[in-house]
Image: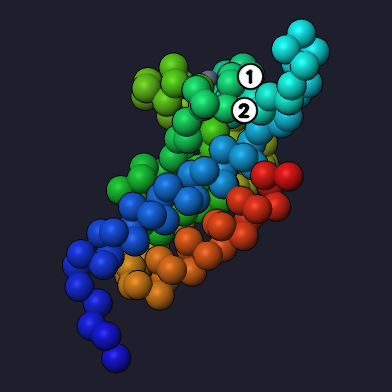
């Protein structure tokens, strides 16, 4: 069996972030017809201020901070937001937005789950990447 090196984990963590966050952006986006330019455009709705923003300008925000590994790739914890909402500390508005979208229980549960320990292994990370790629495919269409 191959031994897991810290480099493997670091590399896979980055790839898991990239794939998962791309999937979240697609999940939180909708295709619109731009009739003037006669093409389809994908826009994301910001979870917090609910503004629509072009896909390329949207980013994602973690409700329980990204440094918390047990919720770093959690589908409720991570949502598409605009750059303004991403850059400010707005926990209260973020909590309300999570509650509005998923229900009060989820927002509270995320807070509780944030204390759960998580051991990152190559297997765990590979699964996150595989699942995200699968989800990404479904939402891309
Ligand atoms: Zn916003």
Residue at the top extreme of this rendering: 36
**Where 138 sits versus 131, above or below?**
above
Residue 139: % across, % down: 69, 46
**Where 75 sits versus 52, above or below?**
below
Q: Is residue 3 left or right of residue 117?
A: left
The residue at which mark 1 appears reads as 52
Tell whether label 2 touches label 1 (CB within 8 Å): yes
Q: Is residue 114 visible?
A: no
The residue at which mark 2 appears reads as 44
Residue sitting nearer the eye, 130 or 114: 130
Residue at the bottom extreme of this rendering: 1
> Residue at point 41% right, 50% down?
17
Residue sitting nearer the eye, 97 or 129: 129
Residue 49: % across, % down: 57, 18
Residue 20: % across, % down: 49, 50
Quadrant assignment, res 48: top right
Q: Is residue 49 visible?
A: yes
> Residue at point 29% right, 59% down?
11
Distance of label 1 from label 2 (alpha carbons): 6 Å
Looking at the figure, which quarter contains the N terminus?
A: bottom left
Residue sitting nearer the eye, 43 or 100: 43
């Amino acid at each position: 069996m191959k031994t897991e090196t810290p480099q493997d984990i670091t590399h896979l963590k980055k790839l898991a972030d990239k794939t998962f966050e791309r999937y979240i952006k697609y999940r939180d986006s909708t295709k619109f017809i731009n009739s003037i330019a006669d093409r389809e455009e994908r826009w994301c709705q910001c979870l917090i201020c609910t503004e629509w923003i072009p896909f390329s300008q949207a980013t994602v925000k973690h409700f329980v901070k990204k440094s918390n590994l047990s919720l770093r790739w959690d589908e409720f914890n991570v949502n598409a937001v605009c750059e303004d909402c991403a850059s400010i500390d707005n926990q209260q508005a973020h909590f309300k937005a999570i509650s509005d979208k998923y229900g009060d229980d989820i927002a509270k549960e995320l807070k509780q789950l944030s204390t759960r320990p998580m051991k990152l292994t190559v297997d765990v990370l590979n699964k996150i990447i595989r699942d995200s790629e699968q989800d990404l495919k479904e939402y891309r269409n």
